[in-house]
Amino acid sequence: MIEVRPFADLGGAHHGWLNARHHFSFASYHDPRRMNWGQLRVWNDDEIAPATGFPTHGHRDMEIITYVRQGAITHKDNLGNQGRTEAGDVQVMSAGSGIAHSEYNLEDTTTQIFQIWIQPDQLGLPPSWGAKPFPKGERAGAFVTLASGFAQDVDALPIRAKARMAAATLRAGQSGEYRLDKTRKAYLVGASGSFEVNGIPANARDGVAISEVEAIRVTAIEDSEIVLVDVA
């Protein structure tokens, strides 16, 4: 099953400083048909105005992955962690027993991020945060795992769920393939470009929900940047 969920049909809210679109029910947007996709609970497409951001707030028992599409996001938390994550790079926060953090766009231009929440396999563990640069050249033409709960993904940022987040940059006409166990689900969003998923067309920022498929073949119609989450 492959279902395209057009960007124009997503829920969302415009707060002035934040233009947010929600692939799944979140905050004031509620759609009982779109509460989650397996362990994937949230996929927010956020545009954050310069010199604004999310003031300090708390999270518990959630794996929160931030993929920066444009600009940069600056993180600070009550564990003493602080860092700036730039476009194409990833940060992971395991909220565990509780963490308070802020995220600000301290840049001169709008920052665009995907914020992805995955339900953890275990609750109440100590919180943690980490970030890592992943140069786009390393994932040109192929999916590269950026965050993972599988021990064999040694180069990825660790998360506390049997899940993966992978990304690929594809030139027009180029294809990348991701193998998926038929018992699992995937959710895929294009950060940029238009593309096909197993022959089904989609555009940048559309969601593509995938299940009962063993091979996901993404072919770029235009130069594209693709982000995929693989969950139980």
Image (tube, rainbow, N blue to C red):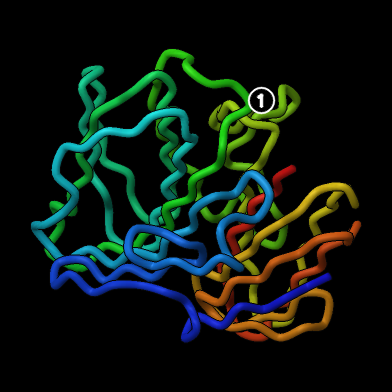
Give the residue drawn at x 21%, y 32%. Answer: 76
Q: Amino acid at mark 1?
A: Val
Q: Nearer the viewer, residue 32 or 3?
A: 32
Tell me the residue that label 1 is attached to. Answer: 154
Give the residue drawn at x 66%, y 60%. Answer: 187
Give the residue drawn at x 69%, y 67%. Answer: 209
Q: Quadrant of residue 113?
A: bottom left
Q: Nearer the viewer, residue 71 or 67?
A: 67
Q: Quadrant of residue 68?
A: bottom left
Question: In the image as oriented, which residue stretches furthest toward the left?
Answer: 51
Disc 1 is placed on an element classified as loop
Left or right placement of residue 42 versus residue 186 in this view = left
Q: Quadrant of residue 178?
A: bottom right
- Above or below residue 68? Residue 94 is above
Q: Quadrant of the N terminus?
A: bottom right
Q: Nearer the viewer, residue 17 or 27?
A: 27
Q: Nearer the viewer, residue 108 or 9?
A: 9
> x, y percentage for residue 27?
34, 58
- Above or below residue 74? Residue 83 is above
